[in-house]
Each structure stands twice: as C-alpha cells, then as structure tokens.
Image (tube, rainbow, N blue to C red):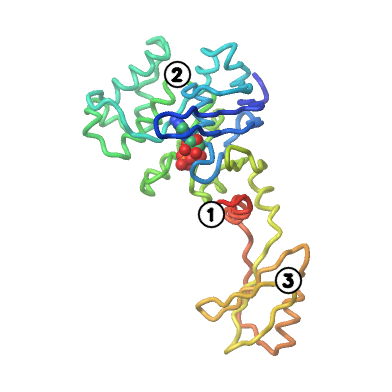
Amino acid sequence: MSQNAIEIEGLTKTYAPSGKQPGKKALKGIDLNIPAGSIFGLLGPNGAGKSTLINILAGLVLKTSGKVRIWGFDQDVNPRQSRAAIGVMPQELNMDPFFSPRSALEVQAGLYGVPKSQRTTDEILAMIGLTDKAEAYARTLSGGMRRRLLLGKALVHHPQILVLDEPTAGVDIELRQMLWKNIRKLNEQGMTIILTTHYLEEAEEICDEIAIVNHGEILIRDKTAALVGRMDKKTLVILPQGAADITPPKGVTLTHRRNGALAFTYHTSQTNASEILDALRAANIVIQDVATEEPDLEDVFVALTSEKGVA
Ligand SMILES: Nc1ncnc2c1ncn2[C@@H]1O[C@H](COP(=O)(O)OP(=O)(O)OP(=O)(O)O)[C@@H](O)[C@H]1O
C-alpha cells in the first residue's frame, strides 16, 4: 500500500468549446497528495474546479495532461485497478426510478464485477438505514433516502477511497448527522475520505487536512488546525458599562455591535491585547464583560479567495 491514497502531478483540464460554450481551462496544473486514512476536504468557490478534479479521479472526465495515481495505480497504466480503488457519491440525485435500493446496489456491484459471495448488500442497506425500503421503487424514496442510496452505491465494491461531492448540500440536520456518523465510521475502519463542501464549519470540524482551490489552482493546503492558525487575526469584544467613546490604537479596527459591545479586531503580530486594554483604561471605560474571538476556516477562505478577486 502506498503512503498516499492519491498522488496528482501537474494535472490540467481544458474543456473544449462546444456550441455557444467557450473553452475553459478548469484545472491549471494541480499537484496534490492525499494521505491514506485521512479525511481530506477540497474547498473552493463555485466554478473553482472541484467537481472537475473529483470527476477525473473517478474516471468520469478525461484529463488533458498530468499524472494521477490512485492507491498506487497510475490511471493511464492501470485504469481498472485505479477505478476499483475509488467509490464516488455524486451530487446529482438522478437514478433509475424502477430499481429498488436492493437491486440498485446489486446492479452496481455487478458493474464492478463483485462476485455474489463478496457482496454485502444487506450490510450496506442497514448502514444507510434503508433495510425497510429495500424492495421499494426508487421513485417512492424521499430525497434524503436517495442520497443515502447514492452513498451505498459508492461502497458496493469496497473501495479504499471514498469521494463525496457536496454530500450534505440541502439535506436536513438529521440526515447530515447520519451521513457524518457513517463517514467517520468508515474512516475509522481505514477508508480514506475526500469531500467537497460549502459548509466551512463542517469542514473545519471533520477534515484532517484541507486544500483550497480557486480558478483551477490550489491556493493552499495544510492540516485544518494549522490553516486556521495561520490567520494572524483576533477580535477582542468589550461590553462597556454605559456609553463609551474611544479611538482604537493604530492598526486596530473598531466595530460597534448591536448590544453596545465594542469589537476590536487586530493583527496578533502587530498588536498586543494589552495595548487595547490600556487604551480603554485611558478613556475611562469600565469593562462589564470581555471575550475574544478566534478566526475560523471561513476567515481563511474569504481572505484567500477574495485576494484573487472572487467574492
Ligand atoms: N463540461 C464542461 N464544459 C465546459 N466547461 C465546463 C464543463 N464542466 C465544467 N466547466 C467549467 O469549468 C470550471 C470548473 O467547474 P467545476 O464544476 O469543476 O467547478 P466546481 O468547483 O466544482 O464548482 P461547483 O462548486 O459550482 O460545483 C467552471 O468554469 C465550469 O463552468
């Protein structure tokens, strides 16, 4: 087994123009290794190239150039093995309306050449909570059930790597929790998880490592905690007793909160919190309450993607 579940070198993708659609350079030379056993988040604004990258890994989109190794198998040299190592839960919910969950899983297993003796259909149905609906027509399933079935379909061939494209977009809290519980459990059993999500809070909570993609390039990649730790920004929130008037120290931004609190945002490399407290004291402001706010992944994301001119 390789140390990395995925190894990508110089990956590019240019979509050819078709009809009124102009051509598009969706990936501009991606280098990325994803460690085996991790939960890896691929984040980026709409149109950044995340789906293109995932679809290339899944063998659904042909790359223009570059190398992709999946579980040690070069996609160009061993396409069958590299495809067998990966399971993909796509975003879209279209599925054959006449298949029951059981037959959908069986057909999928057949497509991957999983022998009957190695199929774990009942186990998968139980895991995705569809045992009761095993024989129901797919068209009678709710949106949430269909999404769970998509997860099940991604698992029929026992892949080492599971890729989830926006797994929790538009799903209710209960289903979201169920999906994360399953994903964590699969990861604990050794499966490498790669996911895209727009929910940054969720990514911060669940992902070991994160890469932020924008305009077809990787802007940054790091362990989640290190990424957030790079933000040289903090906010000191002071609730004063009565009305307060103060000019903040140089380099500190003051905003007034609706509850009367004063929020001082500063760069930790330039300003010390004690300078702000000294200024408050000098202005004879009596502090009723004080709190600090740390940056989160959203701050990192906005700072990085807005630098490159994306709202
Ligand atoms: N089949 C295609 N033909 C032409 N251009 C395409 C095609 N698919 C995607 N693109 C373009 O490539 C770029 C990257 O798209 P992609 O879907 O990979 O982004 P994304 O990061 O997944 O966005 P989203 O979060 O909206 O799904 C976009 O500009 C998109 O319009």
Cα separation between marks 1 and 3: 24 Å
On residue 157, which mark appears?
2
The answer to whether 6 is drawn above or below residue 292 in the figure is: above
Query: Residue 157: where, in percent of width, then height?
Result: 45, 18
Displayed quadrant of residue 291: bottom right
Name the residue rendered at 51%, 23% in the picture.
Answer: 86
Number of other residues with Cα within 10 Å of mark 1, as a class: few under 14, some 14 to 19, many 20 or more: few
On residue 311, which mark appears?
1
Secondary element under disc 1, as helix, strand or loop, is: loop
Frontmost of labels 3 and 2 is 3
Query: Residue 46: where, in percent of width, then height?
Result: 49, 44
Cα separation between marks 2 and 1: 40 Å
Frontmost of labels 2 and 1 is 1
- Amino acid type of disc 3? Gly
- Amino acid type of disc 1? Ala
Tags 3 and 2 touching, CB below 8 Å? no
Label 3 CB, ligand 1: below 8 Å?
A: no
- Amino acid type of disc 2? His
Earlier in the chain: of badge 1 and badge 3, it is 3
Cα separation between marks 3 and 2: 56 Å
On residue 246, which mark appears?
none
Position of 140 with respect to 186 (left or right) is left
On residue 251, which mark appears?
3
Name the residue rendered at 43%, 26% in the picture.
Answer: 154
Name the residue rendered at 59%, 11% in the picture.
Answer: 77
Position of 276 with respect to 18 (left or right) is right
Residue 216 appears in the figure: yes
Earlier in the chain: of badge 2 and badge 1, it is 2
Nearest the eye: 76 or 97? 76
